[in-house]
Amino acid sequence: MTSARLVGINHVALEVGDVDAALEFYGRLFDFELRGRGPRMAFIDMGDQFVTISDGRTQPPDAQRHFGLVVDDKAAVRRALKEAGVEIRPGRGLCFHDPWGNLVQIVDYREIQFSKAEPVLRGMGLDRLRKTDRARRELSHKGLAAE
């Protein structure tokens, strides 16, 4: 019997206390478009992926469990967090809790081995992003094209 191979992540679903408030909060941090909206859900577009925001968060704040968002400008997110009065967790990375306790880590596209296909980057208006030498080496080591 063969096992299915993991290919990627289509979406992540975040539970929040209020979808409208969550869209307002995340809208202060990121430039995004909605893929769709329902009565208790919203879908934030990220090219060929998306994040679902849904009503229903009941658990306490996450301590270690988190999700990472890839951005084109990590420094801009840091500035937006400070302007919004959001506490940045101490440590090496850029991590914060949203108002509902979801732990979010921000990573810069240029610095990691995650990559989008050129047509997706072009469609997102990000075709000028270039990987760091280190990220290109990591991709190359795995036999994956860096750009």
Image (spheres, rainbow, N blue to C red):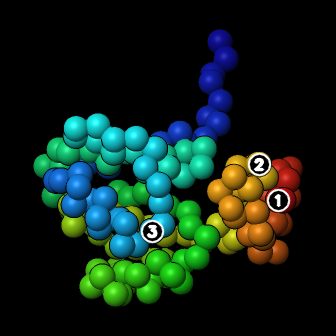
Residue 98 % position (x, y): 28, 66
For the residue marked with disc 3, what is the amino acid?
Phe
Relative to 1, 103 lies left or right: left
For the residue marked with disc 1, what is the amino acid?
Ala
Question: Which residue bears the numbered disc 3?
Answer: 30
Q: How crowded is mark 1: few (under 14 residues within 10 Å), some or many (20 or more)?
A: some
User: Residue at horizontal 69%, vertical 52%?
Assistant: 123
Question: Which residue bears the numbered disc 2?
Answer: 119
User: Residue at horizontal 69%, vertical 64%?
Assistant: 126
Q: How crowded is mark 2: few (under 14 residues within 10 Å), some or many (20 or more)?
A: few
Which is nearer the N-term, disc 3 or disc 1? Answer: 3
Q: Is mark 2 on a helix, strand or loop?
A: helix
Question: Which residue bears the numbered disc 1?
Answer: 146
Q: Quadrant of the N terminus?
A: top right
Residue 18 % position (x, y): 18, 53
Relative to 24, 51 lies left or right: right
Circles 3, 2 touching at the beta carbon (< 8 Å) = no
